[in-house]
Amino acid sequence: MNNEAKVLACVDQSTYADHVTDAAAWAAMRMSAPLELLHVIDRQQGTTPVTDHSGAIGVNAQENLLNQLTEDEASVAIREREQGRVFLNRLRLRAQATGVADPDMRQRHGSLVETLTEQQAGVRLVVMGRRGESSSTTLRDLGRNVERVVRAMERPILTVTDNFTPPAKVLIAFDGGSAARHSVEMVAASPLFKGIPCHLLMVGKEGHADASKQLQMAQATLVASGIDTVAAQVMGDPETAVARYIDEQHIDMLVMGAYTHSPLRSLFMGSRTSELLRAAKVPTLLLR
């Protein structure tokens, strides 16, 4: 098996799996990295309903019930594994059709966050859907795993929306902070964005000398790496301004620092990362 750091596509059996696979295949080829398709079956979703748990039952009935539960759980696990194998094989063929030579496949039972943190030493980039398998029933506009995964991982996370096409323009949401500077350095150094024009957008600091200087330095870093770069400063609410800029400039991918404040602060103040993800309708690369 290839020990090179891989692109890891987290897929579930939702309509977003194809888009995640397409994005991960694009990234793997751009970075000349191996691709792995990972399907994690949540242990909490693998339980089987039992017809009767109540009432006083005898010893024999208890033993029969335990045997039934064991058999039911075993049959569910076998069925899930087989369904997952067929599902992953279809995505593997999809990735191969885009040019990825030999995508790997892996299934795990358990927690997605735990599985990813265990593997992250061998991961270069994680790709996952902005929404997941439960979105059609919960009507959530942001998957429940996104924030937890980003906070737990020390790797870039590419979150994918309803469709994916290779980006022709990239936007970095830049606020002059350490996460934003790291975003600029990563884009400048990564083969992922070579040859793709980049926009730098700073919101709400127009007229400040330090802000203008920070923006110019960031632009110079990108230009020095050979990336055509446009820098802009606008006033207004960051979520609205970024979403408007993406629409007006026909941006295909957003890059930004993510969840730089503690989860406790987010409880009281909300999360700007989550707000931007909801506002931006394009694939977004999140950097911690």
Image (cartoon, grey):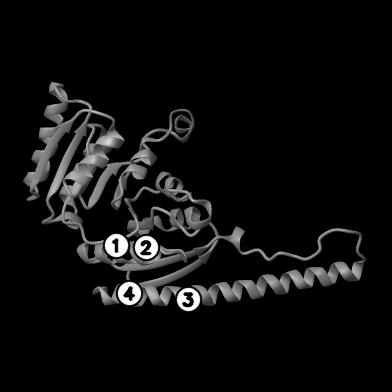
Q: Residue at x 15, y 21 (%)?
A: 208
Q: Position of residue 140 (x, y in %)?
A: 47, 49
Q: Earlier in the sequence, mark 4 or mark 2?
A: 2
Q: Position of residue 287 (x, y in %)?
A: 31, 45
Q: Tell us which disc is closer to us: 3 or 4.
A: 4
Asked if one can make out residue 130 in the rendered structure from this viewpoint, the answer is yes
Q: Residue at x 29, y 76 (%)?
A: 96
Q: Quadrant of residue 109?
A: bottom right
Secondary structure state at the residue bearing disc 4:
helix
Which amino acid, by three-letter code, is at mark 2? Ala
Q: Earlier in the sequence, mark 3 or mark 4?
A: 3
Q: Tell us which disc is closer to us: 4 or 2.
A: 4
Q: How far apart in space, not on screen, are marks 2 and 1 (Cα)?
A: 9 Å
User: Is the residue under label 2 in contact with that under label 4 (CB below 8 Å)?
Assistant: no
Q: Which mark is residue 9?
A: 2
User: Is the residue under label 2 in contact with that under label 3 (CB below 8 Å)?
Assistant: no
Asked if one can make out residue 101 in the rendered structure from this viewpoint, the answer is no
Q: Is residue 24 above or below residue 240?
A: below
Which amino acid, by three-letter code, is at mark 3? Arg
Q: Earlier in the sequence, mark 1 or mark 4?
A: 1
Q: Which mark is residue 85?
A: 3
Q: Earlier in the sequence, mark 2 or mark 1?
A: 2
User: In the orientation shown, which residue stands out farthest toward the top?
Assistant: 208
Secondary structure state at the residue bearing disc 1:
helix
Q: How far apart in space, not on screen, are marks 1 and 3 (Cα)?
A: 21 Å
Which amino acid, by three-letter code, is at mark 1? Ala
Question: Would you say 200 lies left or right of 288 here?
Answer: left
Q: Residues within 10 Å of mark 1 (few under 14, many from 20)?
A: many
